[in-house]
Amino acid sequence: MENMERTAQEKDKKGFVNIGDSVLIQVKSGFYGKLVYQNRKSGDLIVWENPGEIQLMSMRELREMKSDQVGFFKNQWVIIVGVAEGEDCKATPEDICRALVITQYYSNFIDPSDFEEVCNWSEAELKSRISLMSDKAKDNLIVAIAGFIADGKIDSIRRIKTLSKLLGCDFDTLD
């Protein structure tokens, strides 16, 4: 047993960590709203009620999600937080993403729980960061920005016009 645990923690020659199928992983919703995943093989349902909420999924379930519904990763709807408390595996979130071969989907990722920081970005930073976002990530940001405008967190007409242009939507018509 001790030998197996050590093997699971050691990196192979390519820098990958061997993560067993039964290892539980903390997975956070990166979707701005309610997010639902149903495993097409088992029928199991996982629901994240709010952005930033964390659910536990086995590594096997994550592999099945990637092979059957890769959009959860491509669209950055789920974020790997790390292994669950109490697990012997010492894999980092980066190790888990490498093991799932999903790192390419998170290179320009902005966590929805950090969307409020967008309110403070300079115009140059807005242009550079938003231009690198996936279309679905931009959709999430649009919903968040609309909420920030409605709440008065963003009240600069210039900033609203800049965000409208960069995101391809018209925030001026929001009620």
Image (cartoon, rainbow, N blue to C red):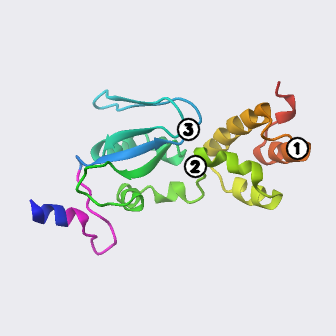
Q: Which residues are magenta?
A: 7-20
Asked whether residue 124 is in view, the answer is: yes
Q: Residue at x 78, y 42 (%)?
A: 168
**Left or right of residue 16, residue 119 in this image:** right
Residue at the spot 82% in from the left edge and 28% down from the top edge: 174
Q: Is label 3 in contact with label 2 (beta carbons under 8 Å)?
A: no
Residue drawn at point x = 55 percent, y = 38 percent: 31
- The span from disc 3 to disc 1 (Cα, nearest Å) is 26 Å
Q: Residue furthest right?
A: 157
Q: Along the polypeptide, which appears first: circle 3 or circle 1?
A: 3
Looking at the image, the residue that sits furthest to the left is: 1
Element type at mark 3 = loop
Q: Provide the residue designation for mark 1.
A: 156
Q: Is residue 66 visible?
A: no
Whether the residues at callouts 2 and 1 have beta carbons within 8 Å, the answer is no
Q: Which residue is mark 2?
A: 111
